[in-house]
Image: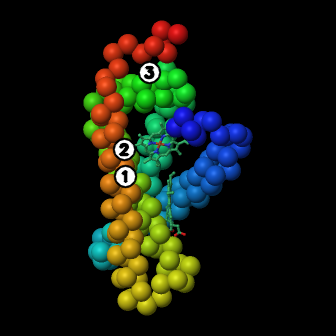
Amino acid sequence: MDKIHALPFLNVIEWLLIYIPILYHTVYGVWIVATGQPNIAQYPYGKNWFYFFQRVSAIIIVAFMIFHILGMKGVFGTNLEFVPEKYALESVRWHFQRHWSVLYLIYPIGVLASCYHLANGIWTAAITWGLTVSEHAQRRWGYVCFGLFLLTLACGILALVGVMRINEVTSPAWLRG
Ligand code: HEM
Ligand code: HEM
């Protein structure tokens, strides 16, 4: 994070590569979720459930990102704020230490929803873009996407384990000023 904050034009990079794409996808995605009509009761096929969970995970990600990004930006108070450079590690630990549910419930669910949504999204995107036409191709691509799901999930869980291994912060220096 320190290295990221040392980048020149960080604001421009963040907006171009992170915020604008996510905002575009979020607005479009929420519209799709809001206008879609789930029909898993009539057609209880496996892949229909996958698509249903694509929408469920989307809603979870919206809520998670509001908590995660605005929290780290300090919008909900200094107790959740990420303070880069001098207090990067401590403030991340402090953020996760606020309540047991942050580390053991909110983040695991946010990570799981994100890993599922990305992997399943890439699987369905290959169909709509005409890349995987045959059933065979879709099955093979499914294995790749499942691998991506496991890989990103492992990275997310390792990040959370990493957070646990930072020593507890009892009196945050940045709160004292
Ligand atoms: C494994 C748990 C996670 C940890 C430890 C973590 C940590 C962080 C930290 C420390 C920041 C602040 C960066 C900064 O201000 O420079 C941040 C920002 C961010 N995180 Fe996470 N994060 C996690 C999971 C996620 C997930 C699952 C998503 C996707 C849904 C996500 C999306 C973002 C976004 C979009 C930002 C804002 C980027 C920016 O301000 O440049 N994070 N995260
Ligand atoms: C912020 C909240 C989000 C919402 C509301 C949302 C919503 C959706 C919805 C409804 C779909 C299904 C579109 C369809 O097949 O008709 C979708 C697809 C997808 N989502 Fe998200 N999403 C969100 C965040 C993310 C994030 C953080 C990522 C990962 C970077 C992501 C990656 C994808 C991908 C790769 C697809 C497949 C795109 C395609 O079929 O062309 N989404 N999203």
Residue at the location (53% across, 78% down)?
Answer: 128
Q: Quadrant of residue 116?
A: bottom left
Residue mark closest to the camera, 2 vs 3: 2
Helix, strand or loop at label 3? It is loop
- Residue 130 is left or right of residue 166, and the answer is right
Q: Please, what is the three-letter code of the amino acid marked with disc 2?
A: Ala
The percent coordinates of residue 21 (x first, y second) are: 62, 54
Q: Secondary structure at mark 1?
A: helix
Label 3, residues with CA under 10 Å away: few <14, some 14-19, many ≥20? some
**Residue of label 2:** 159
State if disc 1 and disc 2 touch (CB < 8 Å).
yes
Seen in the picture, residue 127 relative to 19 is either above or below; the reply is: below
Ligand 1 within 8 Å of disc 2? The answer is: yes
Disc number lying in front (1 or 3):
1
Is residue 76 visible in the rendered structure shown here? no
Q: Which residue is mark 1?
A: 155
Name the residue carrying label 3: 79
